[in-house]
Each structure stands twice: as structure tokens, then as C-alpha cells.
Amino acid sequence: MDKIRVMGGIPLSGRVGISGAKNAALPALAASLLTADTLQLENIPYVRDILTARNLLEVMGVEAEVREDGTATLNAGRVRSCEAPYELVKTMRAAILVLGPLVARFKKARVSLPGGCAIGSRPVNLHIMGLELMGAKCDVVHGYVEASTPGLHGAHVMMDTVTVTGTENLMMAATLAEGETVLDNAACEPEISDLADLLRSMGARIQGDGTRTIRIEGVRELHGSRHRIIPDRIEAGTFAIASAITRGDVEITKCNPGHLTAVLTQLGHTGAEVTIGSDGFRVRGRDPIVSKNVATHPYPAFPTDMQAQYMALMTQGDGSAVITETIFENRFMHALEMIRMGADITIDGRQALVRGGKPLSGARVLASDLRASASLILAGLVARGETVIDRVYHLDRGYYHIEQKLARLGANIERIR
Ligand code: EPZ
């Protein structure tokens, strides 16, 4: 299994280009199931979760080609199976995103339930509730959701919790439902609007994406299209913290700073100098790093997918900071590994108290999930000596060659095969 080795102590400098967003590309791939025509996608990150999604579509009979140059061609004209097998779903929860499109177009689906994950129980009850309100019959049998319908119809779906993939699944299903669907308390992450843009370019009638209320007027069928995926705001945020924590000077390009307002504002509060440009932004790290509390919430607030990276920064703060994780019940695994590097962190349920100002020392650490692995690289960039991160397959799920990108910014980092 690959490992990443980092030698700390070097301020990063230079320019880094951001890849396409994994969490926008995954629903876009699933959307290919909504039409028999061809979908051309651009700016797709060549990361492991995308390849898993491709494999899943291929198992169903979709012609799916994903290339390292960021382009993908998909055609679901000859689908032969509406089943998403456990073997693939267990490796990537987002596989649940095929449920809505399959039920909408093929009126049936058999999708393995994702089950729990390192960061929380993560049920999909709202996905199922929404489909049932739209006229699907859903049963959970032998670990699979078995759904069928004579044809979906519009419905008013109030989601008591804001769910990103739940909103995406139901929005896709509603595009082919008879009549109007209203999704209330919907997620409004930029990835939702990117999916809505793609679906509209396929002929869907969608309004209100980007707000808490989305209206979808169903149509009889959707057609093919070409769509460019938005940049990855979480990858951009990760590099922003890499510059701040190393007291570096990095220009982060090919991204939309408007998708990161909460993160960049918080970074400014911690003393880093953030300059917004047209194609990205620049972060200059400053001393001291000011300790500041933060709480994660649905977009446009501070994202949970930046919480671990922010914790690494706060280990170098000039005081104490309280980090509150409101989205997932078990998303502090990285803290235990940072403590092994000498950080002073106390966990109390969904709150972590990070006392800054303690120098970190390099150690062997274990990645538990995608963003935790990124946060351990950030901690390693400022630790004295060598840090070796194990289980980096988590990292490869969502970051494209992050160690090479960091090395081009001057980091002493390498992958150990
Ligand atoms: C998406 O996951 C992202 N994944 C996650 O990114 C991200 O952390 C999360 O949204 C929150 O922003 C993708 O887009 C592929 P949720 P998702 O449904 O949709 C509860 C990364 O690092 N809930 O918005 O699975 C749930 O338990 C990943 O790239 C229900 O109770 O998350 C959680 O507490 C990690 N019932 C909350 O809602 C449901 O039916 C938000 O989860 C659905 C969700």
C-alpha cells in the first residue's frame, strides 16, 4: 500500500492549478443514466472515486469512457441492468446517486445500501422518503434498496436535514416525473447548481437551485449534452491552508473564490493575507496564526470537508480554538493522529478544543478518510522531521496527485510505493 513521506519546515511558494470537483463530477456521471443520448463531460478529476463510478456504470451497460485529460464520454442507450452491486457501493457511498436516475427512467432499481462510514452513520432515509413521495415503492431487502414505480409524479418533499446527495438524487429523479416537484430545505452547495446546469442543458426544467427551495417541472425525456464541471473548492481550500500553515505565498488558480467565501473569510480572521483574483486567489501566510473558533454547517457556511485541514492550522495557532462539527457525528479521527505528532487537542462529543503553539514532530500516522489524510499532510508540512502517512488510498479517492502539486510548490514530499 502506498504511503506519503513529508519532511516539514519549508514555506510553500508558487502557483497551483485546481482540478475539477469530485463532488460535482459524481452526480454528473450518474446523470448520464437519464438519457439514451451521449453526454460529453470536461474537467473531470481523474481520481479513484470517479473510476469507481465509471466501473459501476459499465456494470449496468453504460458505455463510459473517462480520460486522464479530464474528458469523459458516456452513453446509457443500451443499459442492461438496473443494479448497483454491494462490491462497488461499499467502496464509494456516492454510488447511491444512481438510484434516482434509474427509478426515473427505467422505473426500477436495485441499489446496495451504502452502510456506515468512518465519519458517521450517514443514512439515506431522505433519498428513499423523497422517492416514495414521488410514487416509488421502496423496500430494503438483503441490504439493497429495491425500488419500482409505474411512473414517478411530482411531489412536495420537505427534507428535515440538509442533504447534498439527497438533493441531487431527488432533483435528477424529478426531471422525468409527471408534474412539478418542490424540494424544500434543499442543499445549495455549488455542486448542486452545477448539476442543475447540466440537467438544464439536457432539457430539464429546474429553478431555484442555489436556494433552499428547488422547483423541477418534469419532462417526457432528456437529450445529450456537453458540460464542463466546476473546479474543486475543497481542493482549493486545502491548498489555501497549506500556504497559511507553512507561512508560504501561493497562488491558487483555475478555481472560483466565490465558492469558498466562508473558508477564505475564516482564513483572513486567522491572520493570513488573502487576495482574490479573477481566476483564483493568493494566500500569504503570516505570523502569528491567530486561533479562531469555527463551526461547520451546510453551504454557504464553513464546510465540514475543510474541518480537518482547519484543525491542522489551529494546532499552530497563538491561543485556543473550539472546532464544532455539526454535520457528521464522528469526524475527528484525524485529531488522534495529530495528537501523536504532539498537538494539544481535547475532544468532547462534536467539539474539539485545539490549544495552539505546540511544535509538531514528525511521526508515522494513519489516514482514516479522505479529508483526514489531507490534514495529516498539512500537519507534516510544519512538523519537525519526517512524517509518514499510511493508507493514502483514502487520499487518492478525491485528490489528483496532491503530493506532486505540493512538491512543485517546494514541499519535500513523496509517495512511497
Ligand atoms: C456530501 O455527502 C459529500 N459527498 C461529502 O463529501 C460532504 O461531507 C457532505 O455532502 C456534506 O457536505 C459527495 O457529494 C459525494 P449529506 P452526503 O447527505 O451527501 C444526514 C468528501 O470528503 N442525512 O449532505 O452523503 C447525514 O447523516 C465527502 O468529499 C440523513 O440523516 O452528505 C449527515 O449528518 C465526505 N439522511 C447530514 O445529513 C439522509 O437521507 C449531511 O449529509 C441523508 C443525509
Image (cartoon, rainbow, N blue to C red):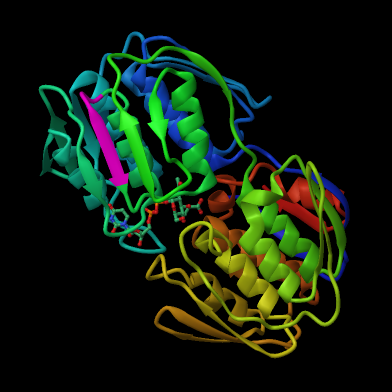
Q: In which quarter of the image is residue 18?
A: top right
Q: Is residue 14 above or below residue 26?
A: below
Q: Which residue is drawn at 41% across and 12% down?
A: 223
**Residue 52 showing in the rendered view:** no
Residue 137 position in % (x across, y down): 10, 35
Write down the quadrant of residue 275 in the picture: bottom right
Q: Quick check: can you spot residue 319?
A: yes
In the rendered view, tell whether residue 18 sits above or below residue 385.
above
Q: Quadrant of ligand 1?
A: bottom left
Near-viewer residue (322 or 373): 322
Compared with 394, 386 (above or below) is below
Whole-percent x and y of residue 179? 22, 26
Q: Front-most of 183 and 60? A: 183
Q: Which residue is drawn at 77% across and 79% down?
A: 289
Q: In which quarter of the image is residue 130?
A: top left
Q: Nearer the viewer, residue 218 or 102?
A: 218
The question of residue 130 being in magenta is answered with no
Residue 97, given in percent of the width and then of the height, sits at 35, 37
Left or right of 404, for residue 153: left
Position in image of residue 84 (x %, y %): 28, 32
Count of marks, rendered view: 0
Q: Is 323 or 370 nearer to us in this picture?
A: 323
Q: Which residue is drawn at 82% across and 82% down?
A: 288
Q: Residue at 58% x, 38% y: name it.
A: 47
The boundaries of the magenta stretch are 177-183
